[in-house]
Amino acid sequence: MIVCKFGGSSVADASQIKKVKAILDADARRSVVIVSAPGKRSKEDEKITDLLYKCNEMVQKGESCKGIFSAIQERYLSIADELKIEKKMLSAQLEEIRQLIDAGRGADYAASRGEYLSAFLISQYLDFEFVDTADCVIINSDGTVNPFSYDKIRMIHDNSKKKGFVFPGFYGASEDGIIKTFTRGGSDITGSVVARAVNAELYENWTDVSGFLSADPRIVEDARTIDRISYAEVRELSDYGASVFHEEAIAPVVKYGIPINIRNTNRPDDAGTLITADVEQKKLAGVSARGGLSRIKIRKLMLFKKSGMRHALLTMLHIFGIRPSYSLFGIDSIVWFYDSRMASEGILDAMCERLKSEFELDEVSVDHGHAILGIVGSSVLEDGSYIKAAKALEQSSVPVSFLNFGASDVSYSFGIRDEDKSRAVSVVYDALFR
Ligand code: ASP
């Protein structure tokens, strides 16, 4: 059995949904489907999920969401029209949802309805069973998937006589039954969870590109498609800012070795990218850069003499809402990089004060405008490519603040300035991939 997840662009309108049906009809093993909410039909268009968040914001401000919601209503009804689906039930559901959003059900409920309605509508079109993920995907308070979810999904699946199933992506419910969403793009996670629960032979993730590219095509126009890549490499590439597949969506399938195939709904004959536990041939996969980072530098003579110091310092950062994503350690120093959106200047000042006084630090400073350039591939530790990459950066005058080599088996990274991100990706791509 193949589990297929279709992203927002694949279900953006009726003509896209017809493509979905053609893809499913082409292989009888494609019997389990996960859908996103309708995405953009053109560059200027709005995603249904964004509109739903806006509806909730209106309600928070004390106004009715009626105005914005009518655009949502129209979109679903016109899809139903074109697919020749009976609209009575859909209209009633739309009205009930509008009332509940207006009654203040909150952001997670509002956002989840995009996927709910999408799955409801598509299940009718395909004559598949609609399975509400609020009844079977349990999301823990830290955003992880509760393992009971797998049994629940399997039971629903095994006890149905329908020829196929449609699950809405992106949301589930907390243990006490309240609707809860994953982070943005989270339908990829739902796809992985369902694939694992039903023990799929393959998880196909249908989107609007023919797989992972070795660099962002807005920077490297002719970046090549990666045909095979490992789970570990995908996680690293996503962490360095490549955005085809949600970085948390790998976890549910890794232990079970279910392969993931990234495919293009608009070009169904393209093979796409196959993600598996291992790759047959060691090689470079891609280069990507993640910006928007700030840096905390800490110095203290004999910093590590006292055991538990690093842990205590990190705990203090957490108290101020900062969770660093990269760290470097020296004999008397620590450098942490974190997403700049995590703390305002006021919070940072208070944190530095507190760190300095509580730990008697010699120096603590924070500065902004950093980025990390990551080079990912199964061959990175052996191919000496870091020398070529460093040379390319030097020749094009991209200052480097650190090199992190050896912490991962499948990547190394350079600290660079945010403003140099695109140039760095471009020159490193030229040096390593051409
Ligand atoms: N519709 C949600 C979003 O736009 C989730 C998803 O598409 O995966 O983030």
Image: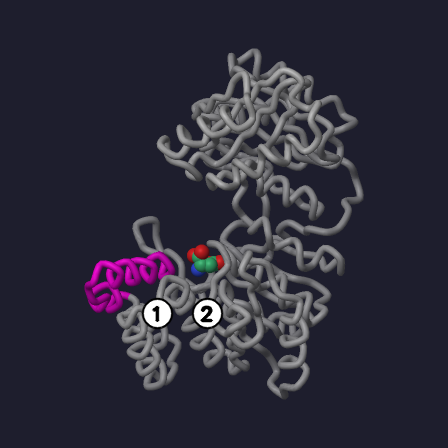
316 and 148: which is toward the camera: 316
Question: Is 359 displayed left or right of 10 in the figure?
Answer: right
Which residue is identified by label 2? 179
> Could you tell me which secondary element the residue under label 2 belongs to?
strand
Q: Give the class, few, some or many, for how many residues have Cα within 10 Å of label 2's Cα (few <14, many ≥20).
A: many
Expressed as whole percent of the image width and height from the top left, the position of residue 78 reads: 31, 72
User: Would you place residue 358 above or below residue 92 in this image?
Assistant: above
* Disc 1 + disc 2, Cβ < 8 Å: yes
Q: Give the class, few, some or many, for how many residues have Cα within 10 Å of label 1's Cα (few <14, many ≥20).
A: some
Confirm whether the magenta stretch covers residue 388: no
Region in magenta: 47-71
173 and 391: which is toward the camera: 173
Residue at position x 24%, y 60% in the image = 58
Disc number for residue 105: 1
Residue at position x 46%, y 69% in the image = 179
Expressed as whole percent of the image width and height from the top left, the position of residue 83 reads: 39, 76
Q: Quadrant of residue 148?
A: bottom right
